[in-house]
Image (tube, coloured by chain):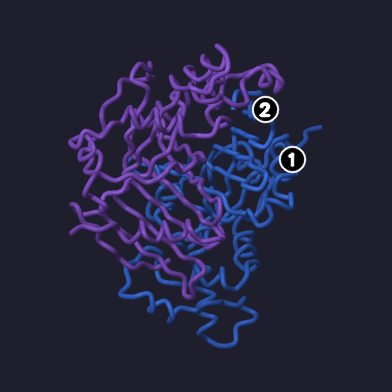
Chain colours: A purple, B blue
Amino acid sequence: MVSAPRWLAALTTALGLPENKGQIMYQLASVDANGNPHVRTVGHRGFVEPEGSPNLPLLMSATDIRTPKVAQLLANSTVEIVWWLSGSMEQFRLSGVVRLVPPPEAQLPSPITKVSSLAIDKLDAQGFEWEKKRVEAYDGQPPFLRAGFARPPPGNIIESYDIGKSWPGAVPKFADAQNEEEKHAYERGLHSFALMYIEPVEVDWIQLKERPNRRTKFIRKGEDWAEYIAVP
Amino acid sequence: MVSAPRWLAALTTALGLPENKGQIMYQLASVDANGNPHVRTVGHRGFVEPEGSPNLPLLMSATDIRTPKVAQLLANSTVEIVWWLSGSMEQFRLSGVVRLVPPPEAQLPSPITKVSSLAIDKLDAQGFEWEKKRVEAYDGQPPFLRAGFARPPPGNIIESYDIGKSWPGAVPKFADAQNEEEKHAYERGLHSFALMYIEPVEVDWIQLKERPNRRTKFIRKGEDWAEYIAVP
């Protein structure tokens, strides 16, 4: 009988602490074509696991296919996340690979090569409905977040901040759209919205409120997680 | 007459806001010898600038020479920082190079090649006392932080969390040491303590509390900073 890794229990516990309320942002590091590092804050959108495999959790987040990180992830799917929970003074570092789920019709900066890894392969084998989940995630977010995907390409140079006033500040779900403009904005956003499934294979957990400080490393070996205590 | 870049004023303003109180941690991304990304939380230890060059600010932070990031930075000095200020919902991403200042006697994982860049070179030319600043920074930190550098090598596997109880929880300054053990701990830490001077050449500032959201990019060109408004 497999069970969830202890790092996931620790992370879930930390996220539930009142002193960490609202800390659902983490930093995702990737590498560009020149071999240089990049890192940005992304919002956590939940955990996923293959059916019957709580030992193989993934983290889900979203991105816009027009951002530079998409080209980076297509070229090198290895990423590292750092999640600093300032309330409880805990740091989780998770390294692994990311499966990008772009809109099926998207024109990507480079051809998509399907990332293969234990949990991702299991989801594939189980007929996980990647595209359906993508649309659900797009629909499930608040209108102001959805609006972020209906703007011109992120990073494009504009003349003034005021140009942003012509973009929708909120984009309702398709069913709630009041006019053609809102329907178009909904569709436009859906064509840019991608999910990222991050499959960690190594986790480094540091607890700085503990005296003495604690550090625990988890390394996936086959389907199991080996656990080590380390010097912080 | 040169002046400080507007991103530094924005960052300093953000750091001074009551809603961002205590948010002096940022995430530093680097790349390992295999070309994979790594990222961890580090503590901000202040800004530095060459004399007469407020336009060329650097960020200072500290590390232990025995951590994997030191080998990474020696092999590839290009880094990116992300500083997420949750109170004001602002993100600053700074990319640039890092000059590592290890203890002069340190045995490093690879030979140190002096990073050359505009601000770092000016500091060199002005006779900036890198080693003196390193000792000052080591002395200037609270005893519990200094203790972190007097432990066995970070990341080493240990038998149990309790082994940490044998390490000093606080290491006073040399002048305040009460006995030989504290003096040794002070010296041990000083032999592991390194400074990192990060010289940004590009900065990406996102303001998510503004409606519409704002994004501003700053790119250093020669000694000047070009500024662009961009789609968030």
Residue positioned 65% across, 30% down in the render: B213
SS label for mark 1: helix
Percent position of residue A134, x then y = 38, 30
Compared across the picture, whether B27 is left or right of B130 comes to left
Q: Earlier in the sequence, mark 1 or mark 2?
A: 1
In the displayed structure, would residue B159 be above or below residue A25? below
Residue highlighted by disc 1: B9
Residue highlighted by disc 2: B212
Q: Residue furthest bottom?
A: B179
Badge 2 sits on which subunit? B
Percent position of residue A45, x then y = 44, 41
Compared across the picture, whether B86 is left or right of A8 comes to right
Badge 1 sits on which subunit? B
Residue positioned 55% across, 11% down in the render: A180
Q: Is residue A33 visible?
A: no
Query: Are there few (<14), some (14-19), or many (20+) residues within 10 Å of tag 1?
Result: few
Q: Residue furthest top?
A: A180
